[in-house]
Image: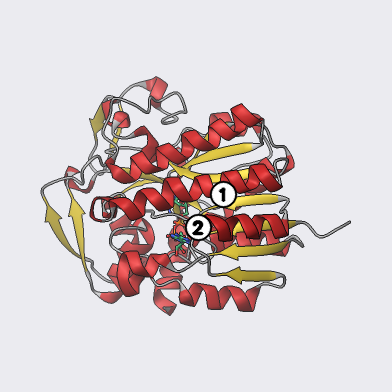
Amino acid sequence: MPVRRAIVTGSSGLIGSEAVRFFDARGWAVHGVDNNMRADFFGPDGDTTPNLNRLRLAVRQFTHHPIDIRNRQAIDQLVASERPDAIVHCAAQPSHDLAKDRPFDDFEINAGGTLNLLEAARRHCPESPFIFMSTNKVYGDAPNEYPLVEQPTRYDYARPQDYEGIDESCRVDHCLHSLFGASKLAADVMVQEYGRYFGMPTVCFRGGCLTGANHSSAELHGFLAYVARAVREGRVYRIYGYRAKQVRDNLHAHDVCSAFLAFYESPRPAAVYNLGGGRGNSVSVMEAIDRFEQLLGKKLKTEYVDKARVGDHICYISNLQAFKRDYPSWDVSRTLDDIFQELAAAANTA
Ligand SMILES: NC(=O)c1ccc[n+]([C@@H]2O[C@H](COP(=O)([O-])OP(=O)(O)OC[C@H]3O[C@@H](n4cnc5c(N)ncnc54)[C@H](O)[C@@H]3O)[C@@H](O)[C@H]2O)c1
């Protein structure tokens, strides 16, 4: 059987680097696209060079291309020359808060870069699954309209019908997104359109909090990994509003990649799924701090900012039922505690 080829964008980042490892381990040849823009966005904390170096040592058939996805011609040439069996698009400006300071970079990377890839795929490999990492921020702050109850350590949904979390029917308009949410939504709709209009096998995975030891965590992006880092390094961790009871669901990057593979093996056009850790892997900021303090044996210095981040979700749990219905072999394999242990161990050896 010929070796299958994937192009993975954002290949030095958290999800992209995991995807390179994951597909490489299954015998694929992987072409990674990453220009280390994360260092430009977040400074030294965001530098993905160590990740790229680790990747080069760990994988067998990997070619790195330091291309900017805004470079339409270079992207077109790469897709034309490789004609990959799958495109896994993870490159992004990923921060909700940073987008307002870099609106053109944010939109040109998130929306324009995605269009460059889609169009190159349509020209050169329209049959190949196009897998896009979207985000739950496409729902803007609409999830905050779900009635909530305040519990001692977290918020939770008040109505029994919301127990499993937010599903894909949550509306995406008439709400506040942040510029990041808006640029990702533009890309998400475009990915769906290439599926519907051209019949291409495209999927948008609307991620909850995605995590793993390879996160080059920075204050503005990488929730759990950054809490672990702050505890270890004695940094002050700023909590923005909601009395630290805001809830996120966390999915390990490995489980994100197994969802990519499931879609590759059984693709469909214009698919959209929420993808996070679900209720079982949900945790509030307060609970997460507590667990890392136990694991690392140190107290975290916190500063409470009595103002929530603009458009921040109060309680977000991804409802995974649609993806599990269409891909019944997929499930969350890394529990919340597995994730805590891994991040604490990584923080200790960093
Ligand atoms: N990590 C999360 O919690 C999370 C949650 C929901 C959605 N997502 C989405 O998943 C995807 C991957 O996220 P991540 O956490 O791995 O982010 P990341 O920042 O770790 O990785 C993104 C990579 O893209 C690269 N990149 C940025 N701009 C680029 C450009 N113009 N050209 C080439 N490369 C560029 C960066 O250098 C970085 O290595 C993103 O689309 C993000 O919006 C992530």
Quadrant that contains the N terminus? bottom right
> Assess mark 1: CB under 8 A from ligand 1?
no
Instruction: Choose between 76 and 345: the one closer to the eye.
Output: 76
Q: Pointer 1 and pointer 2: residues touching (CB < 8 Å)?
A: yes
Across and down, in percent, residue 271 comes to 59, 32
Instruction: Choose between 27 and 109: the one closer to the eye.
Output: 109
Specify whether 236 is left or right of 87: left
The earlier-in-sequence mark between 1 and 2 is 2
Tag 1 residue: 117
Q: Amino acid at mark 1?
A: Leu
> Assess mark 2: CB under 8 A from ligand 1?
yes
Q: Give the SS element for disc 2.
A: loop
Tag 2 residue: 69
Q: Which coloring applies here?
A: secondary structure
Q: Give the SS element for disc 1.
A: helix
Q: Amino acid at mark 2?
A: Ile
Give the class, few, some or many, for how many residues have Cα within 10 Å of label 2's Cα (few <14, many ≥20): many
Across and down, in percent, residue 107 comes to 37, 48
Quadrant that contains the C terminus? bottom left
